Image (cartoon, rainbow, N blue to C red):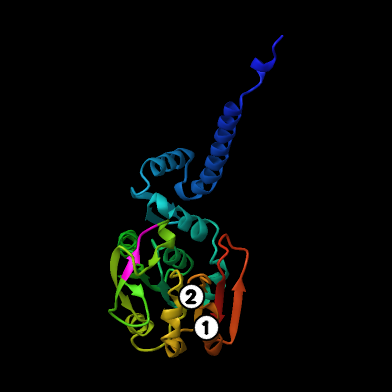
Amino acid sequence: MNTDARQPSSANLTHAGGFSKRVVDFSRRASWMLRLTGSPWQTFTTIRQIRRHQDRIQTVRSGPFSISFRGTDELALYEVLVLQEYDFLRPFLKTCDRPKVLDIGAHIGTFAIWTLSVNIQAQVLSVEADPDTFQISLQNSQKLASQGFHWQTLEKAAGATDDEFLSFSSAGPSMSHRLNEEGDIAVYSISLRSLLNVIDPQHEGVDLMKIDIEGCEENFLCNNPDALDQVKSVVVELHPELCNVKKVLRILKSKYSSIQSINNRLSSKPLIYCQH
């Protein structure tokens, strides 16, 4: 008897393997998405909509907050609101009275939302350069502002100086968009000093500044080092392939007595926590 007909072909094996991988991927995705949708059916519907329309705005919830996002923004939801990668800041934020927080490289605002969930009295100023992503962040901040939260957003690129005309690239995943001389989007810059004048005009001190700006941290920090005297603590994600990390660290070490590396993150990029 010819037994070859009973054996699965390589094509069938490949198809079966691909199907199994898709099932596993869906299950993993659904397990964390469920924490933001509240029901299995809403999770299924949200994932299906993301697959069909990556740029269509969807809505999930984190605690009492309704959050707008696109399919391309999933990783931001996962890292900040599900994995809670900034949770090491919780004890500090909870002890602050009406903390002033600068969110540099806000993306769709997940860090600001997380901050306000920890301390509802926080005053947050977010800066985002990508015009499309800024619009999502603006939607989120306006929803929270209507509920009495203090969250302001600016469509600017964090830079060395004010009002410099810069090119911004929208290529690739939304969380990795960055300044690029050949970029297809124009955006104006704003300096650290000017941002401090917005959030802290009386120079009483900013409690926390979070920075995630895809390599622009060198220009932003190293051209305004004295402005850091007004900032009590800084969390910055460093991008070794895009800037001079040693130069950035040298500036931070000259201004902060405690510098800690945050480990056990999904991202391999260094995350540094600095305190006076």
Residue 130 lies within the magenta run: no
Task: Name the disc covering residue 205, or none.
Answer: none
Report helix, strand or loop for mark 2: loop
The quadrant of the image that shows the N terminus is top right
Q: Is residue 81 above or below residue 16?
A: below
Tell me which secondary structure the magenta stretch mostly adopts.
strand
User: Is residue 248 something that shows in the picture?
Assistant: yes
The quadrant of the image that shows the C terminus is bottom right
Give percent across and percent down for residue 151: 35, 69
Question: Which one is nearer the viewer's eye here, 249 or 154?
Answer: 249
Residue 213 quadrant: bottom left
Give percent across and percent down for residue 240: 53, 72
Q: How far, Cα to Cα, is label 2 from label 1? A: 9 Å
Q: Is residue 191 above or below residue 81?
A: below
Give percent across and percent down for residue 176: 44, 62
Residue 182 quadrant: bottom left
Three-letter code for the amino acid on which mark 1 is drawn: Lys
The crowd level at tag 2 (other Cα within 10 Å; few <14, some 14-19, many 20+) is some
Range of magenta residues: 167-171
Residue tagged 1:
247
Task: Name the disc covering residue 243, or none.
Answer: 2
User: Is residue 276 something that shows in the picture?
Assistant: no
Q: Badges 2 and 1: C-beta atoms under 8 Å apart?
A: yes
